[in-house]
Image (cartoon, grey):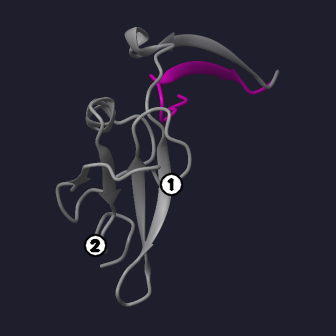
């Protein structure tokens, strides 16, 4: 499976002997070709100097990590130490970005894969 940040997940069948991939299907075909927002990986320094792995989604058409003018922002928190946020297509981020919001997801320490 190939999961881009700005569209539906695409599934392929990989032939190891021939080293070729054959396209199978898209999990959400209605999203193909739409101008969705880009999710950017970002590391935010914590007060103790360690980096917090984060993901920033800005409305479509905004390039770079800093928008040209201030935007309202939603801080998206995942459900606890047994989970984490990941890079890729996130429907809620896309919905909010489509309405002009910046969305920030932070993997705080204790998130799965980020220490105790």
The residue positioned 79% from the left and 26% from the top of the image is 19
Name the quadrant containing residue 93.
top left
Classify residue 94 by image quadrant: top left
Q: For mark 1, does the 10 Å Cα neighbourhood hold few (<14), some (14 to 19), or many (20 or more) residues? A: few
Write down the region rendered in magenta. Answer: 1-17
The residue at the point 75 percent across, 27 percent down is 16
Residue at the spot 56% in from the left edge and 11% down from the top edge: 24
Q: In 3D space, how far apart are the residues under numbered discs 1 and 2 (Cα atoms)?
A: 26 Å
Q: Position of residue 40 (x, y in %)?
A: 49, 49
Q: Is residue 10 magenta?
A: yes
Residue at the left extreme of this rendering: 79
Q: Quadrant of residue 46?
A: bottom left
Q: Is residue 87 above or below residue 80?
A: above
Secondary structure found at label 1:
loop
Task: Give x and y (percent) for residue 25.
Answer: 50, 11
Q: Which residue is mark 2?
A: 110
In the foreground, 35 or 72: 72
Tell me residue 9's x, y (percent).
47, 24
Figure disc tally: 2
37 and 86: which is toward the camera: 37
Q: What residue is disc 1 on?
A: 65
Instruction: Report the front residue among 63 and 45.
Output: 63
Label 2 crowd bin: few (<14), some (14–19), many (20+), radius 10 Å: some
> On the picture, is 46 further left or further right than 6?
left
Task: Name the element at disc 2.
Answer: loop
């Amino acid at each position: 499976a190939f999961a881009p940040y700005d569209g539906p997940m695409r599934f392929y069948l990989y032939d190891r002997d021939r080293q070729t991939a054959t396209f199978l299907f898209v999990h959400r075909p209605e999203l193909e070709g739409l101008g969705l927002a880009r999710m950017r990986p970002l590391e935010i320094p914590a007060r103790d100097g360690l980096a917090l792995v984060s993901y920033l989604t800005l409305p479509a058409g905004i390039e770079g990590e800093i928008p040209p003018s201030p935007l309202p922002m939603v801080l998206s928190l995942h459900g606890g130490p047994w989970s984490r946020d990941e890079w890729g297509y996130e429907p809620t981020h896309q919905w909010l970005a489509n309405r002009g919001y910046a969305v920030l997801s932070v993997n705080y320490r204790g998130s799965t894969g980020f220490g105790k």
